[in-house]
Image (cartoon, rainbow, N blue to C red):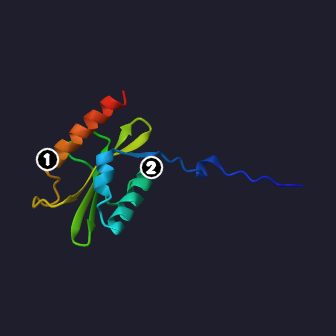
Amino acid sequence: MTTLHRVASDKVRKTRPISWLKAARKDFERFPQGAKDECLDALSIAAEGGKAPVVKPLLGMDGGVFEIALPFRGNAFRVIYAVQIGIEIWVLHAFQKKSTQGVKTPKHEIDLVNDRLKRLKEMLK
């Protein structure tokens, strides 16, 4: 006789799909492998409903847009993603921060994210 074992439903992870804008993926692929791995770990945590320690809300944006702010080997890498567009998490932008403005995300990067977010929302209507 076979015994069936059931997994309690609260133990099943509900993972959201992660989608990438083509330009963001292309820029991300230029990151060093270690930085890519850490950013992908943070995105996986977001897909499971959590927030990694290197993630913060992106200032100057409506809610639901987050920034992975990763210091890596003396450089700063950023991945911007949105969580409130459909069921997917959308990666909007990835870049190596070279600004001298301290931790603040440069205005031209925020403008690019705003433009991509607007176009994405129009595309998904």
For the residue labelled by badge 2, is the local secondary structure a helix, a strand or a loop? helix
Q: Residue at x 21, y 72 (%)?
A: 74
Horizontal side of 21 relative to 98 (left or right) equals right
| Type of amino acid under label 1 | His
What is the x, y in percent for residue 43? 39, 54
What is the x, y in percent for residue 98? 15, 61
Please rate how many residues cluster around mark 2, counting C-alpha atoms within 10 Å: few if below 14, some from 14 to 19, many from 20.
many
| 2 vs 1, front mark | 1
Q: Residue furthest left?
A: 100
Whether residue 66 is visible here, answered yes or no, is no
As drawn, 15 above or below 120: below
For the residue labelled by badge 1, is the local secondary structure a helix, a strand or a loop? helix
Task: Quickly name the residue at label 2.
Answer: 47
As drawn, 35 above or below 63: below
Cα gap from disc 2 to disc 1, whole angstroms: 27 Å
Please rate how many residues cluster around mark 1, counting C-alpha atoms within 10 Å: few if below 14, some from 14 to 19, many from 20.
few
Q: Residue at x 17, y 53 (%)?
A: 105
Going from N to C along the chain, the mark reached first, 2 or 1, is 2
Q: Residue at x 18, y 48 (%)?
A: 109
As drawn, 116 above or below 103: above
Q: Residue at x 35, y 67 (%)?
A: 33
Tell me, for residue 108, which label it has, or none: 1
| Type of amino acid under label 2 | Ala
